């Protein structure tokens, strides 16, 4: 008998006898996710608790069919059952998910260890490929849900990426503005420079760069709702002569720029398209420009969560640092700075989840209770992923081989004033 089988058998402790099918399903479940410190309760009142631990929460199953599905595919089955209301968490959802990340074999990778999970992950990778047509469909399914939805829980600028908290108690609005300025400082922007932005969201960074640093920006995005909103914001601020929001794929960015920046888009490129992303950077800034890429990453290679790719973020992939750096190597770009803002993203998500919960009734009315629960799980699981270290948030600065040196030290990043 393997060590995992012994561990699985030793975790089964119940207040009443378990049937053979229940025992088998639970062994498979514990083998898949590890000894998560929770109490499991099945519909008839049967309780199962790992011995020697104090449960941090209770997980209630509405039916045994749900338990059976979890035994075969814990991640996807749990996500769907929670969204359907077939699983109820009595306790802190974030803490439960964080414990699951910490106990999950391999740190909670999305590919899964069983052949059918790997096969499904491969099929999803093919089905959600981020070609030009595929990217437009993938982005539409997430970012075109409606601006009114995102206004319920994002900050007033609609910044949907990791904030930067100068102090732990900073407000979300202050932290997002600090992030925008932090990116500009890292880029060493100078008045009159031309900037290409790939994946501009609702336009906050492009508008900030133009208004505060005097640069001109061409910002590319394939979300129609985001581009429309960003153009209206540019007009309202009198920045249409400085910022052009272009509804087009990043692969169609042309040359002639001093700076390239992408915040929160690399996750949607897909590993097999990194060479295209690298070629786009080279075409945009050549050998004399500089850039910054801000992205969700990981410390180990593997496919992203299958449940999130299926229900929330189709086509998503979180790369390791070496996978991201590999697309810069053919063009001899020098990586000048790398920073991991992992705790900042956990704090950002805590703010988002709190606002989302406060708007829960509105979300359910706009879409459905299923949608509300699915997005709650997505936000809570993201907090857990960053807190447990399964997810990272990297900012990578780079420059071409002929780019002039802009700063001797990092001190200017933390000083008041502009460069």
Image: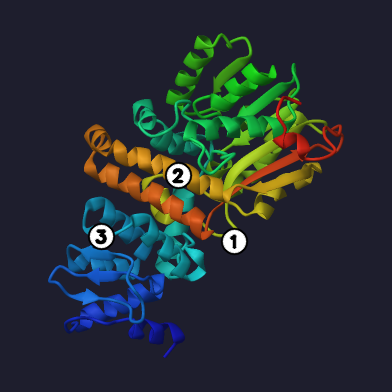
Could you tell me how many numbered marks the image carries?
Answer: 3
Residue tagged by mark 3? Answer: 90
Based on the displayed image, in which of its 4 quarters is residue 245 positioned?
Answer: top right
Q: What distance separates the C-alpha of mark 1 from that of mark 2?
A: 22 Å
Q: Residues within 10 Å of mark 1 (few under 14, many from 20)?
A: some
Q: Where's residue 416, x and y in %? A: 70, 29
Q: Which residue is mark 2?
A: 349
Which residue lies at the image location 46% right of the left edge and 19% below the top edge? 228
Mark before the other along the chain sequence, 3 or 1? 3
In this rendering, the label closer to the viewer, 3 or 1: 3
Q: Secondary structure at mark 2?
A: helix
> In the picture, residue 1 is in which quadrant?
bottom left
Q: Which mark is in front, 1 or 2?
A: 2
Quarter of the picture containing the C terminus is top right
Q: Is residue 304 visible?
A: no
Q: Quadrant of residue 397?
A: top right
Q: Helix, strand or loop at disc 3?
A: strand
> Which residue sits at x=45%, y=26%?
156
- Residue 168 place in picture, x, y as percent: 53, 44
With respect to residue 281, does 196 lie above or below? above
From the image, tell me which residue sits under label 1: 300
Q: Is residue 240 above or below residue 178?
A: above
């Amino acid at each position: 008998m393997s060590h995992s089988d012994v561990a699985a058998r030793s975790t089964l402790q119940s207040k009443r006898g378990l049937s053979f099918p229940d025992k088998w399903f639970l062994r498979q479940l514990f083998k898949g996710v590890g000894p998560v410190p929770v109490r499991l309760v099945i519909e008839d009142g049967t309780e199962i608790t790992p011995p020697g631990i104090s449960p941090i929460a209770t997980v209630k199953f509405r039916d045994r069919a749900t338990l059976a599905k979890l035994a075969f595919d814990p991640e996807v089955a749990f996500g769907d059952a929670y969204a359907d209301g077939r699983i109820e968490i009595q306790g802190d959802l974030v803490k439960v998910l964080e414990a699951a990340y910490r106990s999950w074999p391999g740190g909670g990778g999305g590919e899964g260890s069983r052949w059918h999970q790997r096969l499904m992950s491969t099929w999803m990778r093919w089905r959600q490929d981020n070609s030009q047509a595929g990217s437009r469909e993938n982005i539409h399914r997430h970012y075109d849900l409606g601006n009114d939805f995102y206004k319920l829980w994002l900050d007033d600028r609609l910044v949907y990426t990791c904030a930067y908290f100068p102090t732990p108690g900073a407000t979300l609005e202050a932290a997002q503005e600090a992030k925008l300025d932090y990116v500009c400082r890292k880029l060493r922007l100078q008045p009159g420079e031309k900037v290409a932005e790939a994946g501009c969201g609702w336009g906050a960074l492009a508008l900030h760069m133009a208004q505060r640093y005097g640069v001109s920006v061409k910002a590319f995005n394939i979300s129609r709702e985001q581009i429309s909103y960003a153009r209206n914001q540019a007009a309202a601020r009198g920045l249409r002569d400085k910022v052009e929001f272009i509804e087009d794929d990043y692969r169609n960015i042309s040359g002639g720029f001093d700076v390239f920046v992408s915040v929160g888009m690399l996750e949607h490129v897909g590993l097999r398209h990194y060479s295209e992303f690298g070629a786009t950077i080279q075409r945009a800034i050549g050998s004399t420009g500089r850039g910054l890429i801000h992205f969700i990453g990981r410390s180990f290679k593997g496919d992203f969560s299958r449940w999130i790719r299926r229900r929330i973020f189709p086509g998503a992939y979180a790369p390791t640092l070496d996978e991201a750096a590999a697309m810069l190597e053919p063009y001899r770009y020098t990586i000048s700075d790398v920073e991991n803002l992992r705790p900042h993203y956990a704090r950002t998500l805590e703010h988002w989840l709190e606002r989302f919960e406060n708007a829960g009734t509105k979300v359910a009315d706009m879409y459905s209770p299923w949608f509300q629960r699915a997005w709650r799980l997505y936000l809570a699981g993201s907090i857990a992923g960053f807190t447990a270290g399964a997810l990272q948030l990297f900012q990578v600065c780079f420059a071409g081989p002929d780019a002039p040196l802009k700063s001797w030290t990092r001190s200017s990043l933390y000083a008041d004033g502009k460069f």
